[in-house]
Amino acid sequence: MAAGVAGGMLIEGAGRLARGERPRVEDLLLTPANVLRVTGQLAHLRGAAMKMGQLISMEAGDVLPPELASIMARLRADAEPMPRHQIQAVLDREWGPGWLARFESFSFRPVAAASIGQVHRALTRDGRDIAIKIQYPGVRRSIDSDVDNVATLLRMSGIVPRHLDVAPLLGEAKRQLREEADYRREADCIERFAVLLKDDPDFVIPLVHRDLTGENVLAMTYLDSVPIETLEQASQAERDRVAARLIDLVLRELFTFQLMQTDPNLANYRYEPTSGRIVLLDFGATRAFPAAFAEDCRRLAAAGLGNDRPGVRSALTVMGLIDESVPQRHQDKVMAMFDMVRASVLRSDVFDFADTTILGRLREQGMEFAGERDGWRLPPTDALFLQRKVGGTYLLAARLKARVDVKTLVARYL
């Protein structure tokens, strides 16, 4: 992959030089041909390499040029499915030879395939309609090398500044991916969230079938539902309700549960048309937040809603989102971006997620800030995972063109 990317950069660079241009390395790397080459290889590799590509595509989808964003989006859906003999081998090891006799029917064609595993539908002899997530062989063993190799590619490309110490983030990425590959842990997280949300009529979580769950296999009740994005055709009232419930769930996870499913991939949310309930799936990326971090976030939110700018700066500094070691102009730009969001939320009682003006202005300021590489710092890991969930939830609400009273929702937790 690296050789192909390098060759593509040389060809593209030569062509641009011949036209009298002076291209930057970053521009040569992020050509559609090179991104297609990288995403195709990561989709084939699966595992942690593909997972990192998914994170890049989700986070950067509204920052990258449209042609690159559409290519990167392949990684949110395209995974090479396991052939039947490989599925058979994994389940032979997990359930023992002759396991197929336990089922009335078992579809070897996956209903979903992602970075770490794929999902099959089956009907047991005792009448249980279940979804079975099967992990790709070797994924757990490859996590460290996959993350290191992608990090090396980023360093060699020059996209990551030399002064930026990404070692702590890479270590956290490996830890998180190991947890996602631990299906027994995910089963525990599913059952924990089922308890936390048992009295909430707006959400439904699949039941874990422990007799069929192991290290590499997770069996859950199959829930008949449709993709959450089909709500784009629903009434404004229903889109508003669903978005409000998802935003409120983020706030509860942070301030009440201090336990959060940090992967807001669209595929992890579905919808039951008959009941109007939101189906929550995939709890591998569940993360516990320290009480002190939740309290820091509470202070930041209170200062923001109270229009207390000094309080906002103080809270951002305590959380490590404003770094006093960087030039004042960088601190001021972080404050300016937060001020922009705060002003948009406070402007009226209802926040219109269909209005993309704020997103466009944030994109422009963010890209300008990113261009000043001497100001790059890695914020605390908890803040990064929270940002991932908040950002993904925002993009989902924007896709639904929802209108939500965000101020009132947040105020309940302050």
Image: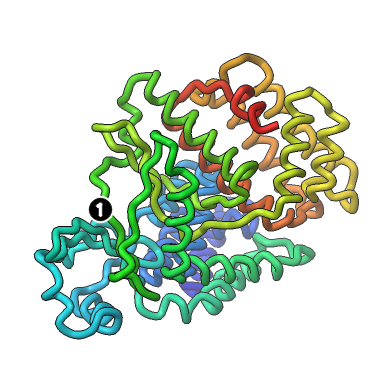
Residue drawn at 16 percent across, 64 percent down: 124
| x, y percent for residue 185 | 47, 67
Numbered marks: total: 1
Answer above or below: position of 222 versus 255: below
Res 224 seen here:
yes
> In which quadrant will I find the C terminus?
top right
Which of 403/373 is in front? 403
| x, y percent for residue 389 | 56, 46
Is residue 346 left or right of 286 when viewed as pictured?
right
Answer above or below: position of 21 versus 80: above
Is residue 314 left or right of 341 when viewed as pictured?
right
The 10 Å Cα crowd at callout 1, few under 14, some 14 to 19, many 20 or more, is some
- The outermost residue toward the top is 348
Which of 396/306 is in front? 306
Is residue 328 left or right of 353 when viewed as pictured?
right
Quadrant assignment, res 109: bottom left
Residue pointed to by mark 1: 222
| x, y percent for residue 294 | 70, 46
Residue drawn at 62 percent across, 46 percent down: 387
Res 22 seen here:
no
Is residue 160 left or right of 79 when viewed as pictured?
right
Quadrant assignment, res 40: bottom left
| x, y percent for residue 77 | 35, 54
Residue drawn at 24 percent across, 32 percent down: 274
- Mark 1 falls on what kind of element? loop
Which of 376/215 is in front? 215
Q: Amino acid at mark 1?
A: Tyr
Which of 371/131 is in front? 131
Residue drawn at 13 percent across, 68 percent down: 103
What's the image's color scheme?
Answer: rainbow
Answer above or below: position of 95 versus 311: below
